[in-house]
Image (cartoon, rainbow, N blue to C red):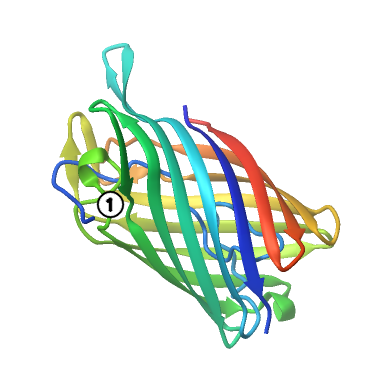
Amino acid sequence: MRRWGACALLGWAAPAWAQEGGFDARGFHAAGHAGYPLGWVTLETPDPGWEGAASAGVVFDYADDPLVELIVDDTIPVLDQLLTGNLVVGASILGAARVDAVMPVVLFGVDQIGTFAAPGDARLQGTVALVDRARAGVGVSVSPMVWLPTGAAARYVGDAGVGFGGVVSAGAEAGPVGFVVNAGARTGPSAVVRNIEWGTNLLGGVGVALRADDQTSIGAEVRGAPSVGGGTYGFPVEGLAHVRRLLPGGLWAMVGGGAGLS
């Protein structure tokens, strides 16, 4: 079971390397587009933002038992606790595309060795709008992604090599309600550690959000990353809920919580 809490302050302006012997088991995927009013925590949005828009912020997540090992009928924590700060920056290009970068840093972790602090794998991505939501009613975009091996693989917060993947996002709004669907995949270096095989994962999720007023939105999302190609990492699925509030000066505050569903 994995639980998390998140809080971020986000600005929105209008016009150590991997080691052998592990993989990235953090599971938390801090999405780009932090300044989107109906923004999601872990899901990408098809809206690239308006021309000249930029955002920056930090999303904190806490995980309880994010990685456990099943031995007979018992589970033994491999990663017991993780408190991570995710630096998220992004900018819109001509209102038709967006670039984002996410850098996670484990501020406090507990594993079978002891406590630690370490960087995670940085992620770079671009988002290109394929269908304009303002014109068609439904927005569609594609987001290619690259994961760089900046994390500590030996502490299970980084892969041993570069990872590649991407997500197709579709979203729409009906009055104060917004919807989004993500589907994609990620592939990286294969790893077999203990009784866990790590390799390629599908990426997918759905989300819904409600504009409670001009400054506040309430959202819920479900995201999964099942392993494919013989991997035994399992079928991790999480349900998340959050509240976002626009503060003076163009800052966003967000708080939320969730739990593992599988």
- The answer to whether residue 211 is above or below residue 143 is above
Residue that carries the numbered disc 1 in the rendered image: 151
Q: Residue at x 62, y 57 (%)?
A: 9
Look at label 1 and name its amino acid. Gly
The x and y percentages for residue 259 are 55, 32
In this orientation, does residue 29 appear?
A: no
Q: Residue at x 15, y 41 (%)?
A: 21
Secondary structure type for disc 1: loop
Q: Relative to the observer, which residue lies in front, 64 or 84? A: 84
In this orientation, does residue 38 appear?
A: yes
Left-right relation of 177 to 256: right
What is the number of callouts on the image?
1
The x and y percentages for residue 242 are 67, 45
Quadrant location of residue 165?
A: bottom left
- Give the farthest residue toward the top: 73
- The answer to whether residue 159 is above or below residue 230 is below
The x and y percentages for residue 163 are 28, 60
- Give the farthest residue toward the bottom: 94
Q: Residue at x 33, y 41 (%)?
A: 25
- The answer to whether residue 183 is above or below residue 64 is below
Quadrant location of residue 150?
A: bottom left
Left-right relation of 26 to 39: left
Quadrant location of residue 161?
A: bottom left
- The answer to whether residue 193 is above or below residue 57 is above
The x and y percentages for residue 11 are 63, 67
Q: Relative to the observer, which residue lies in front, 117 or 82? A: 117
Q: Label 1 neighbourhood size at 10 Å, few (<14), some (14-19), many (20+)?
A: many
